[in-house]
Amino acid sequence: MATAPPAHRGRRAVATILLWLLVVIVCWGFAWVVAPDANAGGQCEGLGFGCTLTPQDSLALAAFFAAPVGVGTVLLGTVVALVVDRARWLPRLGGAALGTLCALCGLVLTLVLAATLVALL
């Protein structure tokens, strides 16, 4: 006989997904703060003509492309978490474990969807 899933498991799963996003944002922010704002060796700064972005600018450019992936991960991970909770699948998983699993599923689904859209264009 299966045990009943813990109460409020769906809410905890969604909170865990948002917490993982917050962890990624804080780590990126720390990396941006400690990254140098000038290139080593006097290399010119910018894009093109043999110049390269500074480490700080590279992180800002990466955030520009990573922001839609983060939003997609949260949205799709939340949908997966709510479907799993409503269908009472994986009843032994707690909210945090379910949220982590759904965040990973949301990330994979977002990347597959983005690759499919790029391939179609």
Image (cartoon, rainbow, N blue to C red):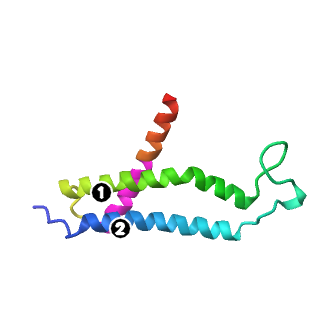
Residue 4, x across and y down, in percent: 14, 66
Res 54 → quadrant = bottom right
Which numbered tag is attached to residue 81? Answer: 1
What kind of residue is marked 1? Ala
Identify the magenta region: 93-108
Q: Using a 10 Å C-alpha cutoff, classify the residue at mark 2 as few (fewer than 14 neighbours), some (14 to 19) or many (20 or more).
A: some
Camera-side residue: 86 or 60?
60
In this view, which residue lies farthest toward the left? 1
Q: Using a 10 Å C-alpha cutoff, classify the residue at mark 1 as few (fewer than 14 neighbours), some (14 to 19) or many (20 or more).
A: many
> What is the CA distance from the residue labelled 2 to the residue labelled 1?
10 Å
Residue 40, x across and y down, in percent: 85, 61
Q: Is residue 99 magenta?
A: yes
What kind of residue is marked 2? Ala
Question: Quarter holding the N terminus?
Answer: bottom left
Res 12 → quadrant = bottom left
Q: Which residue matches tag 2?
A: 15
Q: Secondary structure at mark 1?
A: helix
Q: Residue at x 81, y 62 (%)?
A: 38
